[in-house]
Image (cartoon, rainbow, N blue to C red):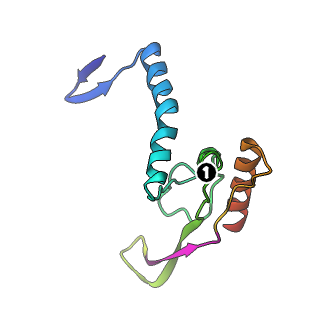
Amino acid sequence: MLVDISNKIRLILTHSELFGLLTAYSTFFPILLSNIIKNNNYVLIYPEKEMWFNYRKPRPFKRGPYYYAARLNIPVISCFVEMCPQIKNENNQFKQINYHVHILKPIYPDPNKTLTENSLAMMEQDYSQKK
């Protein structure tokens, strides 16, 4: 059901509608991902789920990106952006920042591990090399 409140559109879902969306997502997301990979394209996923403004340390990762990498038997190309403050101030509150992109060694799924073991090992390896 769609409701208009104070010139803002809000989407209100019943339990069954929400369940249907989640079921569709869990069914079609792996298929979409697989098709993207088969067409020699890349997928960018932030394993920490979101970015925080001006936060400089890695946050604990979620297992999802590593699960799909292991499921599709593809490597994770580990990278991160380092924010390096400069001496000069941009304004009263912030220093100028240079951004350095680090591309680390790829992390491959181990064919001798289960899907769960692989995703957890890949996640841990990625997190540990970014500390």
User: Residue drawn at (49%, 20%), measured in percent from left and top?
Assistant: 19
Q: Is residue 39 left or right of residue 112?
A: left
Say whether residue 26 is magenta: no
Residue farthest right in this picture: 112
Of 86 and 113, nearer the camera is 113
Q: Is residue 84 above or below residue 39?
A: below
| Disc 1 packing (10 Å; few <14; some 14–19; many ≥20) | many
Q: Is residue 30 above or below residue 70?
A: above
User: Residue drawn at (24%, 23%), measured in percent from left and top?
Assistant: 5
User: Residue drawn at (60%, 48%), measured in percent from left and top?
Assistant: 72
Q: Secondary structure at mark 1?
A: helix
Residue range of the region highlighted in magenta in the rendering: 96-105
Of 45 and 85, nearer the camera is 45
Query: In which quadrant of the rendered view does residue 97 lie?
Result: bottom left
Q: Main secondary structure of the magenta part?
A: strand
Residue type at tag 1: Ala
Of 47 and 29, nearer the camera is 29
User: Residue drawn at (46%, 34%), measured in percent from left and top?
Assistant: 28
Query: In which quadrant of the rendered view does residue 88 lie?
Result: bottom left
Q: Read off the residue under disc 1.
A: 69
